[in-house]
Amino acid sequence: MADKTPVDRARTTFRDRFRRLWGYLLRYRKAGLLGLLALTVSNAFDSAAPLFLRKAVDLIKAGAARPDLLKYAGLFVAITFCGGVARYFVRQTLIRASRKVEYDLRSDFFGQLLRLGRSFYHRTPTGDLMSRATSDVESVRQLVGPGIMQGANTLIVGAFALSLMFYLDWRLTLYALSPLLIMSLVVNRLATRVHDQYTIIQEHFALLQAHAQENFAGVRVVKAYTQEEAQSERFRELNEEFVAKNMLMVKLQALFFPVLALLVGTSVVVVLYIGGKHIIEGSLSLGSFVAFSIYLGILTWPTIALGWVVSLYQRGSVSTDRLNKIMDSLPEIQNRPNAAAPERVQGAIEIRGLNFRYGENGPPVLEDINLSIAAGQTVAVVGPTGSGKSTLVHLLSRLYTVPDGAIRIDGTDVNDWPLAKLRRAIGFVPQEPFLFSDRLAANIAFGFESGAEVPEERIHEAARWAHLHDDVRGFPHGYDTILGERGITLSGGQKQRTSLARALILDPPILILDDAFSSVDTHTEEAILSELRDVIKRRTTILISHRVSTVKEADRIFVLDGGRITEAGDHNELLVTGGIYAEMYRRQLLEEELDLA
């Protein structure tokens, strides 16, 4: 098959670029069609007005009576008023529809971000996503609102005005249009440069936002290392570069209006000269010349606005490409077509021959993992930093791609479970909890459906299990306390206990505690574990910890080292073997003795 021609490739690119945007426009096609109808009616009235003025001027020259002049003046005012009313409806339909498209696009973009997996966020800066959700969405709205409105206005005005200009004097019309032929060359050349420059601007804006977002999120680190001036200087450099790139864009856009105005002005000069000769020769009446001049004036703004429309199109097309890149990304982890899960989740976990690495060429993280956890059993996974403990429990929830058949829950491959049901069956408490800027009670009840009424007593019960209730009673506003960003108003231990309460309130069949007590002292840890004993007995529990005191009561303990299970057994059995676990235990006993000393 022959290669596509450049034109075919351009058409394909245009179709691919705007296919999703076209779907949004179709949702509001009724408003769009009404808006275009109102725009046509408005321009029809505006185009009819000069014809009445033409008649009035010719009547004045012929010495018409006052009543005739008043009649045409009244008609002129009425037509202008009707055109203004129609133009009001243009904005009420087209611009309102563009705001609805913006709303839908931003909502869908946010929903797509929530569907994408962890690996996507590992390679995509938050600032870049924020620039797409704000600046790029706004550019698309400008394209589908003012861009479509002004573009359609230029076509409709041109059709009406040029038709009537040809009707009045076709030769004069050809003379008037001759300077405008250059316009297409100018617009095409500048439009290409605007497109390229706006792409550069948006990419740099994403870099600027990423720098700001990282400094806001890590402000405590910046202050701790007294890097305020250095970070401010870096932001200033990025900002100056952003301004410089925008100034180049301003210069490009500024060329549109003078060049187009010059071409329109040249047309006016040509009309004055040629039209004056026709009036002198008697081939054109004064009224027709006045009407022709008004039509040329009517064409002036749409012609100049064409530069703005081209700029909006180029900006919108760049932003559409950037949004499509995210919207077209497929989540690496999706439900299989016939995904199904047991009606009642028991919590039995079977792992056989599990091997895992991050990326195709990454080093092995887990190798030949084999273990079995009975429903209701409490097991622990321990090992040195980087041994793969957290990765193992992340795979249980399919936060990363799991090899087929490697992990089964209640006898069903986790890849065959519906994602929502699988993750709802697992209560996960991470080592680094994330809390939202909301009420403490809302953070605890976060896992429930949006808008669901969660009984206050259930929230209190979960907090008591997490040994948090007594702390909350000391807060001025109790469970209505508003937490700062990422829960900054709470201590590290209180954050972890809030995260624990969030998992417990859902009563999951499987509970995973990933070093969930690392920020609390051993006394508080013992108190929490004491509260949790009855809770843990009713579910399958996996404990991950660097503290032997946390895991010694587990039914079975697995020791990971270098991505492999090197030891397995209960606390007493592992002490007898004298391996890694026994060494951890002896070291922690020594640390406790030193603390007491």
Image: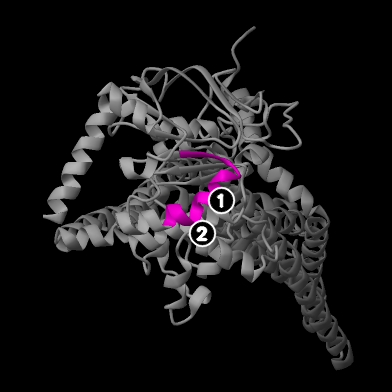
What main secondary structure does the magenta stretch of the protein show? helix
| Residue at position x 15%, y 62% in the image | 229
- Of the pair 352 and 298, the residue shown nearer to us: 352
Badge 1 element: helix
- Residue highlighted by disc 2: 465
Please provide the residue range marked out in magenta.
528-542
**The C terminus - image quarter:** bottom left
Q: Where is residue 572 in the image (x, y as percent from the top left)?
A: 35, 31
- Give the answer, above or below, for where 571 lies relative to 259: above
**The N terminus - image quarter:** top right
Q: Disc 2 versus disc 1: distance between alpha carbons?
A: 8 Å
Q: Does the residue at mark 2 contact the one at mark 1 (Cβ under 8 Å)?
A: yes
Badge 2 element: helix
- Residue highlighted by disc 1: 535
| Residue at position x 43%, y 78% in the image | 475
- The number of callouts visible is 2
| Residue at position x 82%, y 76% in the image | 82
Residue density around tag 2, few if under 14, some if 14–19, many if 20 or more, within 10 Å: many
Q: In this view, does 366 lie to the left or right of 73?
A: left
